[in-house]
Amino acid sequence: MQSQVYVAIQCHALLNFSVFEKVIMTFEGNLAAPKGNILAVDDVHANLHLLTEILTQHGHTVRPVPDGRLAVTSAKAAPPDLILLDIMMPGLSGYEVCKQLKADEHTRDIPIIFISALNQVFDKVKAFSIGGVDYVTKPFHPDEVLARVNAHLAIRHLQKQLQEQNIQLQQEIFERKRAQESLQQRNRELTLLNQMNAMLQACHNEPETYHVLRNICEQLFPSEGGCLYMLHENPTALELIDCWNTSSTPQASISTDYQQVQHGEMYQIDSPMHPLYLYLDASLDNGCPYPMRDATGQILGILLLYSQPPISATSDEEYMYLIETKQLLISRVVEQYTLSLVNLRLREALKHEAIRDPLTGLFNRRYMEESLRQEIRRAKRNGSHVGLIMLDVDHFKQFNDTHGHETGDIVLQTLAKLLQEHIREGDIACRYGGEEFLLILPDASLTTSEQRAKELLEQVRKLRIVHQGTHFSITISLGVSTFPEYGRESQGLVNAADMAMYQAKKHGRNQVAVSAVPDETP
């Protein structure tokens, strides 16, 4: 180490005035020599005066300090660009001053040029070893001091420029990385939104969409919880459908009346017709409701998210940007989900209209024919049975003529409700036409189908219908056929059941009949 410092000293010894002058001239040719704020430390007043005069004449600002302790205090209070430091001073020596300044992170980078009458190699080695950048022996030549000061100010200036450029480069790298991460995040969000749309399109019923929405919210907002509420039959009571990542599951309702709440939360929701108010029976921390509206502005449900403030923001502007970006993302999720939900409900309504009888709500004849064909194909594959029960209301035309078509419709609706309540899951109840109904019983043998028909007959015998204060009772006739005994195709089975039903009517009505002549066609 001492040999390396000795070489450095020798180099500085060779770096005479002319060499320093070349450094300054080179710097001036490029940027112009910088003017500096210089702290001059010497216990000899004449030396301080001379240094101050030399440097101020060339545009530098000089703070003369007569002792080491004051030098340390002054340098820490207002760090200078460069320090000219005497070594031999009473109290605190130049060496100690240098050590203290180099030990402080605020002053350790200040270049220190020692100016001393000590000209031994040992002294110079020590000066460089503790952090000095140069060494000038007394008596000094003014031009030499000025040249060395200007050279080290130039170096210091270049170092600061390099540090600033490094900081700027690091900031640019950081900002570019943040921009890249932000772009990746936006791409991920877009991908998830597209996945959400595809999964919603594949949903067959509304409950399946609830799972899709929860799954997407958990991926887009992994650190946040949520609750999903939907409006169904009750126009004010919100049904709690699902909750995730939260221990709070408040009950919710919507009202057009403003009410003060002592416990819980109240939110005003904009509405095209009139203000709406969302009431929750529990207080929320960072919870925010997002209404789901159809094209007319009607509320379909509420998505409640417990948002966490962004912790990665480095400024107020970035904080607001992250908040706005998140709000936009939530809005897109809600809008996309609502649109898919409306489309699904529309498809279900159209499907319902296509396969349901509008009066009774039972499946219509078109659906019955397709379902019967499917059940026969399945029974052929599995070697099983399919039962059919054809029934109609006895003397229904006379009933209509006596009591009116409105009462007749009530009878049909009541009978349809009874059929729906007394069939197995998987059985298919249909309105065949007029007052005729048909039941498809998968996996039901002839014996089972006949027994089911008798049970329905008993239920209808007990049935009492009340309309406009008048009590009515009805009877029905039922015919039974089964696959494969009475035919291997749908039309043959229906014809057999129809024939059996007319046999029941022929023998006095209000009874069950089975076709007497099975179809023997292979």
Image: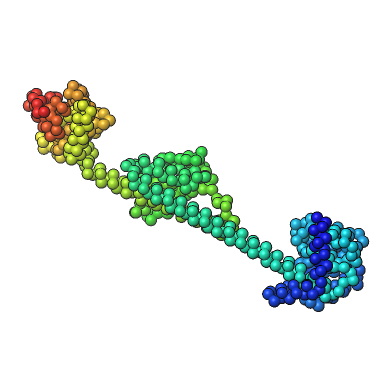
Percent from the top left, x then y, of residue 84? 83, 67
- How many marks overall? 0
Residue 468 can be seen, yes or no: no
Residue drawn at (36%, 53%), measured in percent from left and top?
297
Percent from the top left, x then y, of residue 371? 21, 36
Residue drawn at (50%, 40%), measured in percent from left and top?
246
Percent from the top left, x then y, of residue 442? 22, 29
- Whether 359 is drawn above or below 482: the answer is below
Residue 245 can be seen, yes or no: yes
Q: Is residue 1 left or right of residue 509?
A: right
Towards the viewer: 7 or 144: 7
- Whether 203 is drawn above or below 38: the answer is above
Q: Quadrant of the C terminus?
A: top left
Residue drawn at (82%, 75%), measured in percent from left and top?
143
The image quarter in which residue 122 lies: bottom right
The image quarter in which residue 357 lies: top left
Q: Is residue 319 left or right of residue 385?
A: right
- Whether 58 is drawn above or below 80: the answer is below
Percent from the top left, x then y, of residue 510? 13, 26
